[in-house]
Image (tube, helix red, strand yellow):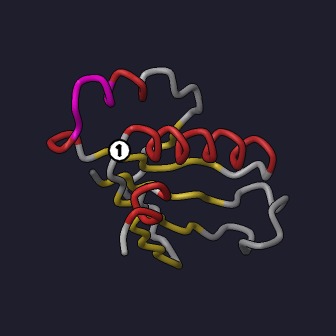
Amino acid sequence: MKISYMLVNHSGHDLSMPIGAAWQWIHEVDDEKLMRSILEGLKRITHEDRLTLANLRINQRECSDVLLENTFGFKVSVLYDKTIAPKRIIHLHEDDEEENLQQP
């Protein structure tokens, strides 16, 4: 399943991202646990670093109903704006750590 979103630094509070910049993240996740972890991280980051969450997309074709139900509990405002152009795109493939430990 793919989760993509942008974080925009309108406040200038987060010094790791230039003021006014938008960075896009694309996560490929394999299970509900990883998806929850990403969404919890977004809650924390947007609150602590005062970043704006924009254009959140979840590839629903690959999601189970149980997985999608968990996204309704995500209580962060999301800005949807097609004019936002990311200055950096970060593509990550998230694997379950337990699965990685079992591989030879």
Q: Amino acid at mark 1?
A: Asp
Determine whether 40 is above or below 55 in the image.
above
> Looking at the image, which residue is at 65% across and 39% down?
43
Question: In the rendered image, which residue does mark 1 sit on?
Answer: 31
Q: Between residues 44 and 21, which one lies in front from this camera angle?
A: 44
The majority secondary structure of the magenta stretch comes to helix
Helix, strand or loop under label 1: loop
In this figure, what is the number of numbered marks? 1
Residue 14, x across and y down, in percent: 80, 62
Does 30 sit left or right of 20 as displayed? left
Q: Is residue 89 magenta?
A: no
Label 1 packing within 10 angstroms: few (<14), some (14-19), many (20+): some
Q: Between residues 10 and 44, which one lies in front from this camera angle?
A: 44
Determine whether 16 is above or below 45 in the image.
below
Determine whether 63 is above or below 74 in the image.
below
> Looking at the image, which residue is at 39% across and 67% down?
93
Quarter of the image with the C terminus is bottom left
Span highlighted in magenta in the image: 63-68
Residue 51, x across and y down, in percent: 69, 52
> Looking at the image, which residue is at 77% across and 48% down?
50
Residue 23, x across and y down, in percent: 55, 68
Determine whether 64 is above or below 48 in the image.
above
> Looking at the image, which residue is at 63% across and 49% down?
52
Q: Is residue 65 magenta?
A: yes
Residue 24, x across and y down, in percent: 48, 66
- Furthest toward the left, the residue is 61
Does 71 sit left or right of 41 as displayed? left
Q: Between residues 55 and 30, which one lies in front from this camera angle?
A: 30
Does 28 sit left or right of 18 as displayed? left
